[in-house]
Amino acid sequence: MPALARWDAFLTQIRSRHEQVRADALANGRAFIASVAAGGDYQPLSHQLSAVKHRLQDLEAKIMDTWHAQVDDAILAEGNSVERRDAACAQGVALGHQLEDARDDLETALMAELARARYQAAQAALVPVVCASCGAAYQPPHSFRLIEMACTCGAPVRYDPDELMRSAGAIGTHAISQEAAAAELAAMRAADRAARGARSPTPLHLLQAWEAAQIAYWRRYLAARAWFEPELGRDPALEVKKRMEQWYQYTADQEEAWRAAGRPRAI
Ligand SMILES: [Zn+2]
């Protein structure tokens, strides 16, 4: 078989093995989630996920390892053009990115599912909050933390979420927000790779596209996260700005084109 055809077959095989490991992890993860939806130690899911992550990373690493060890030279030795060789290499790189993203998304999806299952169970178990002073009963407010309200009689009433509700919050805060921002996350990953993949110095338009994609991601992510952490909703623009600061300082400001343009921060 010619080297190019072998490469194609190899990539197809890696892709399908990766898919299989993820499908198994999803099925196992879901079965486990059903067993801990109403409470219990969920650490085994994290352990399971980290074992799966290593297997998936091994498969991903095989792509470029194989390319360098067996494919790159063989393609040229068989008389193919450098362009054809580069295109074959780019195919491998693209698959690697795709699989890396799918691996991240798998973990997010399972943790979000666990959080939703726990949230549902916690909701079903909610009991009215009763004023110790006058006995008035209130529907528990939406919160994952202790909340103090004022009763109509003037006495303070406290809603203290139970263990299950608190764990739904702890597990879901990042995972559910990340899932809500899935489209923006995908766009941000693409913009990030486009800018990093460009020949140095990185052109301004790629830096600005990367910046815009990050801002869009943070907006969406933090808007979702505010459901868990209401203080994030108070000044969304400031929250986004805080999260962009590091990128501006350690990435953008290190770029020649960015500095030459007068560090044109969009936020
Ligand atoms: Zn009262």
Image: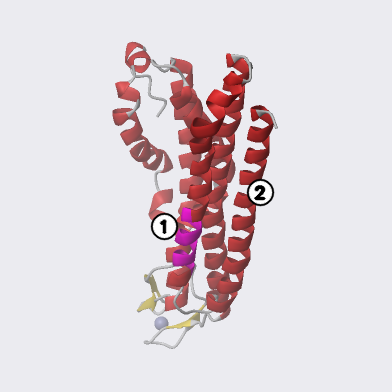
Q: Is residue 136 above or below residue 89?
A: below
Which mark is on residue 16? 2
Give the class, few, some or many, for how many residues have Cα within 10 Å of label 1's Cα (few <14, many ≥20). some
Can I make out residue 162 in this image? Answer: no
Q: x, y (%) of residue 233?
A: 43, 49
The image shows residue 264 at horizontal and vertical percentages of 38, 19
Quick check: is the Cβ at mark 1 less than 8 Å away from ligand 1?
no
Which labelled disc corresponds to residue 229?
1
Residue 46 sits inside the magenta stretch: yes
Judged from the image, the secondary structure of the residue bearing numbered disc 2 is: helix
Q: Nearer the viewer, mark 1 or mark 2?
A: 2
Q: Which residue is located at x 37 percent, y 14 percent? A: 257
The front one of 172 and 42 is 42
* Horizontal relation, residue 33 to residue 252: left or right: right
* Left or right side of 2 for 242: left
User: Which mark is first along the chain, 2 or 1?
Assistant: 2
**The magenta stretch spans residue 223:** no
Q: In the rendered view, would you say 100 is above or below 175? A: above
Which three-letter amino acid code belongs to the residue tagged 1? Glu
> Could you tell me how far apart the alpha carbons at marks 1 and 2 are, in whole angstroms?
39 Å
User: Dot 1: what SS?
Assistant: loop
The N terminus lies in quadrant? top right
Left or right of 244, for residue 219: right
Q: Position of residue 82 (x, y in %)?
A: 58, 15
Q: Amino acid at mark 2?
A: Ser
Residue span colored magenta: 45-54
Look at the image and tell me whether residue 37 can be seen: yes
Residue under the point 49% across and 83% down: 137
Instruction: Single out the residue that lies furthest toward the top.
Output: 260
